[in-house]
Amino acid sequence: MEQLAIFGGKPVRETAIGYGRQFIDNADIQAVVDVLKSPWLTCGPQIPALEQKLCEITGAKYAVAVSNGTAALHLAAMAANIGPGDEVIVSPITFAASANCVLYCGGTPVFADIDPETYNIDPASIRSKITDKTKAMVIVDYTGQAADYDEIEKIAREYNLILIEDAAHAIGTKHNGRGVGSYADMTTFSFHPVKTVTAGEGGAITTNDEKIYRQLLRLRAHGITRNQDEMANESHGPWYNEQVELGYNYRLTDIQAALASSQLDKLPAFVARRKEIVAKYDEAFADIPELIVQKEIAASDTARHLYILNLHPEKAKCTRRQMYDALYAENVCTQVHYLPVYWHSHYEKLGYQKGLCPNAESLYEHELSLPLFYAMTDEDVESVIAAVKKVLDFYR
Ligand SMILES: *Cc1c(COP(=O)(O)O)cnc(C)c1O
């Protein structure tokens, strides 16, 4: 048996590879340079151009570009009119921002457990958490796979709940042929560099509701409007604008919007390559008893953001920590997505306790995110697979 690098053996890879990395080409660079030479660094034509492109890609009627995915979630929660006394159902296996947006508005996140096979929120668990205070759901398309919207949309209709889809992982994904972003009341996106498409920092919200759209436009710019029909008072003249509610400065710059637009032109290529890599991993890991391969539902045509290496709780002979450390020494740098949100000490201080969502907690204890990004070569993929097999062989 080959000696593991962590115990002095030769690493599988000579250079380190991380779990995600952006891909920037000359078209991206030129798009940014063009904006820098233009009169508009912000509030210019790149913003509606990006929003138009997002509508075309997702199939949504309206899109609002904002400064990041967290701002998108905050504005979505505000537009859903979430406030003190309101409960909002959230998946615990997500970045904290999915739940924080409820706290920003004074509402209460209520965590529903995940399905142990797809890792997305389990509709049965959602049903068990609904009370007469439940107002909305923030549903995460974890790893990029669409959640079970056949059931979730039924629940939303049955209990009159606002459906917010956190699609930070899922740009380019389709559910039953419908683009992610085109069916929820509001869908939020992130253009952070670890995501499929980047603007450096950036985000967006899509919706089909014109009233929500207009409110989101106001909220990203202080709550100020220039439209007379949205004002309480008479206009004083062409210079006049009026703050009609409390908003924020959550604008995206034109520099970032141009980068995001240029990146979106590559989305089909990004998605296709990510699918190829996922297929290679799935094939390599399918027959290894120590590993569980994430289940894909037929309804989801997934643009995958993350690849989860999930160690079988009983059959794996090494712990997640042993796998993480051993892979790191082999020059394969992984991450963990995610600590259940309510395990963060801030949430513990709010009174959330361990044991709330057993499937989510079990996934967290056994998972790692393997390298998955557009620019990975086939050799990179093979080396990651070889490193995982080498570690499993050692502990077998
Ligand atoms: C990245 C991410 C966010 C936050 O996006 P930012 O642009 O970093 O603010 C929210 N939800 C999920 C699921 C994410 O992965």
Image (tube, grey):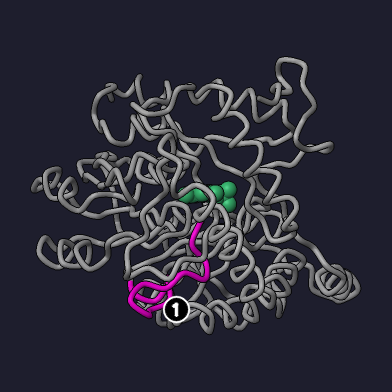
Residue 391 in the image: state x and y as whole percent.
60, 28
- Amino acid tagged 1: Glu
Q: Residues within 10 Å of mark 1 (few under 14, many from 20)?
A: few
Left/right placement of residue 176 relative to residue 301 reads left
Residue 293 in the image: state x and y as whole percent.
42, 48
Left/right placement of residue 115 relative to residue 369 reads left
Q: Mark 1 falls on what kind of element?
A: loop
Q: Residue at x 52, y 60 (%)?
A: 304
Taking the image as drawn, is residue 231 in sight?
no
Point out the stretch of residues depicted in magenta. 169-183
Q: Across the whole image, how many numbered discs are drawn on residues?
A: 1
Taking the image as drawn, is residue 86 in sight?
yes
Disc 1 target residue? 234
Q: Residue at x 42, y 21 (%)?
A: 345
Q: Residue at x 55, y 56 (%)?
A: 305
In the image, is residue 170 part of the stretch drawn in magenta? yes
Of residues 282 and 30, the one drawn nearer to the viewer in this rendering: 282
Prevailing SS of the magenta stretch: loop
Of residues 333 and 349, the one drawn nearer to the viewer in this rendering: 333
Q: Residue furthest top?
A: 7
Residue 65 in the image: state x and y as whole percent.
57, 67
Q: Residue at x 46, y 35 (%)?
A: 367
